[in-house]
Image (tube, grey):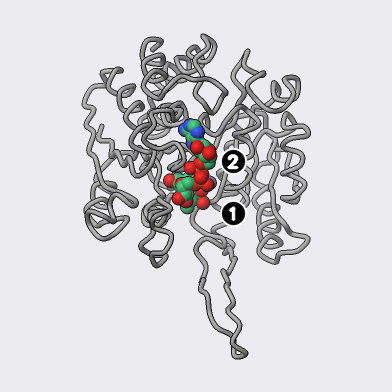
Amino acid sequence: MKIAVFAGDGIGPEVTHEAVRVLKALHLPGLELIEGDVGAAAYRKHGHPLPQQTLDIARSAGAILFGAVGDFGCDDLERNLRPEQAILGLRKELALFANLRPATVFKGLEDLTTLRPEVAGKIDLLIVRELNGDVYFGEKAIRTLPDGRRQGYDIMSYAEDEVRRIAHVGFRAAMGRRKQLCSVDKANVLETSQLWRDVVLEVARDYPEVELSHMYVDNAAMQLVRNPGQFDVIVTGNLFGDILSDQASMCVGSIGLLASASLSEGTLGLYEPIHGSAPDIAGKGVANPMATILSAAMLLRHSFGLEAEAARIEAAVARALADGFRGGDLGGSDGTVAIGDAVLARL
Ligand code: NAD
Ligand code: IPM
Ligand code: MN
């Protein structure tokens, strides 16, 4: 049971440390943790945000626990050396195309969100975000036009097989839940989205029990705060999924609560909070580690089939919240380690 631990930058090491403590406390037979450098930390040490040895560690592991990368001090580096390339590179190199970002409001904690409790209380949704394509990975550059003006461009594209495989993930996820799938696109404007919609409709024939709907992304952003309870599974592209999942986190309480799993066709998976390195609070010991702890739970469930252990972690987090532990992100004053301690005590 080999787990690669890539803590990264900013609050990454702080929150990862707490998740590792939780994993160790379960006394899992054969648990082996191997650390690797990613992000700005790796760039400073090895001259690259995703060094070869880190990739090798990832490939040798059964699962990856990832903290966060990002450092505003690196904003002037050429793009392929920036910290974010570590997570983008891992997703691409390891073909981790399916990103699951569940958002469920914790029972009794409906007052934690900035939505009205009766609205937030109904949230139990899963965002299935495509992770290997879209405008993220198309040709991109800043060029100078013949008339001397600078122009930035990023090509958005999806090939049909890329849409098909993520659509299958969405439909299968819906089959295991309330059998409702909402595909989010911008087919009224984008050809990429038109193909997305056509392919999702083709795949739908394999899942007659699933109630499929389509929604434009602007409306989806609005519906997520108007009536988030209407969503079961949302399947969407890389860029829209990135944005909607940050928004969904706030609907259930805070970005410090949302975990994610990035899966491939094989068994290898990467697990990380949806938040970033939070440079504004890094080093202060105030980051909420719950999203990372919950990511460790997803790791045990999806990569090792340890459902009972995953549920134990999730219950401990829920109990810590119910008992009043709150990070600054939730308007409280409990620090990173105090929250880790609270979860450990409730395991
Ligand atoms: P962010 O998610 O790092 O932070 C946004 C806001 O949320 C900040 O105010 C931060 O303090 C707060 N926040 C985030 N996580 C928190 C936690 N666990 N507890 C309490 N508060 C928390 O997003 P950003 O500020 O836009 O980006 C910062 C850096 O992180 C950038 O370099 C960005 O590229 C990177 N980033 C990396 C990842 C990743 O590694 N997967 C994800 C998102 C952003
Ligand atoms: C996320 C992040 C990443 C993304 C960045 C850091 C590349 O925002 O994991 O949500 O855009 O996918
Ligand atoms: Mn994001």
The circle on residue 246 is 2
Disc 1, ligand 2: is the CB inside 8 Å? yes
In this view, the residue in front, 330 or 219, is: 330
Q: Position of residue 143 (x, y in %)?
A: 53, 80
Q: Position of residue 40 (x, y in %)?
A: 33, 52
The three-letter amino acid code for the residue at tag 1 is Leu
Q: Position of residue 181 (x, y in %)?
A: 68, 40
Q: Is residue 186 above or below residue 140?
A: above
Mark 2 vs 1, N-terminal side? 1
Local packing at callout 2 (Cα closer than 10 Å; few below 14, some 14-19, many 20+) is some
- Label 2 residue SS: helix
In this view, the residue in front, 44 or 53, is: 44
The three-letter amino acid code for the residue at tag 2 is Asp
Disc 2, ligand 3: is the CB inside 8 Å? yes
Q: CA distance from mark 2 to mark 1?
A: 11 Å
Write the residue at 21% across / 31% down. 32
Q: Position of residue 163 (x, y in %)?
A: 59, 56
Q: Is residue 94 above or below residue 212?
A: below
The answer to whether residue 99 of the structure is visible from this angle is no
Local packing at callout 1 (Cα closer than 10 Å; few below 14, some 14-19, many 20+) is some
Write the residue at 39% across / 18% down. 338
- Label 1 residue SS: helix
Mark 2 and mark 1 residues within 8 Å of each other at the beta carbon: no
Q: Is residue 281 above or below residue 154?
A: above
Residue of label 1: 239
Q: Quadrant of residue 300?
A: top left
The circle on residue 212 is none
Mark 2 against mark 1, which lies toward the viewer?
2
Lateral position of residue 300 relative to residue 259, left or right: left
